[in-house]
Image: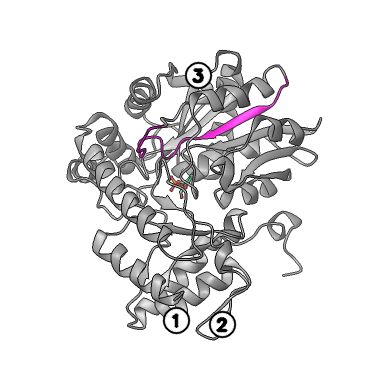
Amino acid sequence: ERYLTRRVLSMQESQTMKISGLAKQMKAEGKDIISLSAGEPDFPTPDFVAEAGIDAIKAGFTRYTANAGIPELKKAIVEKFKRDNGLDVTPDQIIVSNGGKQTLANTLLALCEEGDEVIIPAPFWVSFPEMVRLSGAEPVIVPTTIDSGYKMKPEQLEAAITERTKVLILNSPSNPSGAVYSENEVRALMAVLEGREIFVISDEMYDQIVYGPVTPFSPARVSGMRDWVIISNGVSKTYSMTGWRIGFLAGPKWLIDACGKIQSQTTSNANSIAQKAAVAALTGDQRIIEERRLEFEKRRDYMYKALNEIPGITATLPDGAFYIFPSIAGLLGKSFGGKEMNSSADVAEYLLVDHYVATVPGEAFGAPENLRLSYAASIGELEEAVGRISKAFE
Ligand code: PLP
């Protein structure tokens, strides 16, 4: 291990992967685990999308493609941004990568290095600070609370900025909190940044999984910020395509070209077959997305009500994504089943080991008094899980 670089030693292993690994292992041992720890829809990839992949294989579309993605897919992405996000982008402002993860890693590697600071509001998606560390820059975490709905206020952003600030990472709808910044909230944050040479990486991975009344608003729509906003998105969550590994990035051409340079020397193009499937997903009948969204909404409503009935647990109503992120502050310092709950990691471990419910402790997201539960599971499973959780804290 002493041969490892500072770069990799500064990173932590993905906590969400760790817990779901333990849950999988317990499942394999025959234990009746309900897993609410996964970060992916429980629905299958839509048939018409999978078929486009099969067709691509049969047609021999199995070779290297253009590094930044096939023109057909870039065109579909241009149309998606117009249709769903009210944004005009050109194909040369887009790159297709191996999942949203690679678009974010490429962007941070292109923009950040030692000496730079990247502002990340907490709770945050687990990979943001680790990718920032990988780039050599330093994450600057801005904590938020339940009172602001886990959203950063403009004053907090202002206070976090130094002359070393290079990037702000915004993720709306948020994994893990489900919070969505309204148009006014986005405008207020962008007003702080205007004219200050600070980039915004806007992770909009869950833009199509929203329940209202707040609708997502891309910071790229703020006219003065147009050249400073980079949007990361993908087909993973919207189209239940997590295993296909297709993400895309939109931003200034010079930055997209730099991401292309990194990608061309590390991974090359995203999977050719998956690119064809992504074209089908983005251009096909979008009704299935609406059906799934409505199903998620029912589950969200159930989880919000049921979890808030458990003493010690307080949940905010998520406006998007498929996670609920209750505060479990009311359970800390108490003992259940002979075990003392001193952290959300203790709570998650107790729920998994003693009650067979897998969740993710908030520590992983920079929010040590919360617990993330994914409601990408059937209502039946959710009811069973809530029953177990409620029994665990009787
Ligand atoms: N961004 C956020 C906020 C996510 O939750 C995820 C997946 O968990 C990703 C990006 C990465 O998505 P992909 O699977 O396309 O790499």
- In primary-sequence order, the first of circles 2 and 1 is 2
* Residue reaching furthest to the bottom: 338
The answer to whether mark 2 and mark 1 are in CB contact below 8 A is yes
Which residue is label 1 attached to?
354
Identify the disc placed on residue 221: 3
Amino acid at pointer 2: Lys
Which one is closest to the eye, mark 1 or mark 3? 1
The answer to whether mark 1 and mark 3 are in CB contact below 8 A is no
Whether residue 104 is situated above or below residue 14 in the rendered picture? above
The answer to whether mark 2 and mark 3 are in CB contact below 8 A is no
Label total for image: 3
Image side of residue 202 versus residue 11, left or right: left
Which residue is label 2 attached to?
339
Residue 92, x across and y down, in percent: 47, 20
x 36%, y 77%: residue: 27
Residue 346, x across and y down, in percent: 57, 73
Q: Which residues are magenta?
A: 196-213
Whether residue 132 is situated above or below residue 10 in the rendered picture? above
Element type where label 1 sits in the image: helix
x 49%, y 24%: residue: 183
Q: CA distance from mark 2 to mark 1?
A: 10 Å
* Res 215 → quadrant: top left
Label 3: few (<14), some (14–19) or many (≥20) C-alpha neighbours in 10 Å:
some
Q: CA distance from mark 2 to mark 3?
A: 50 Å
x 25%, y 42%: residue: 294
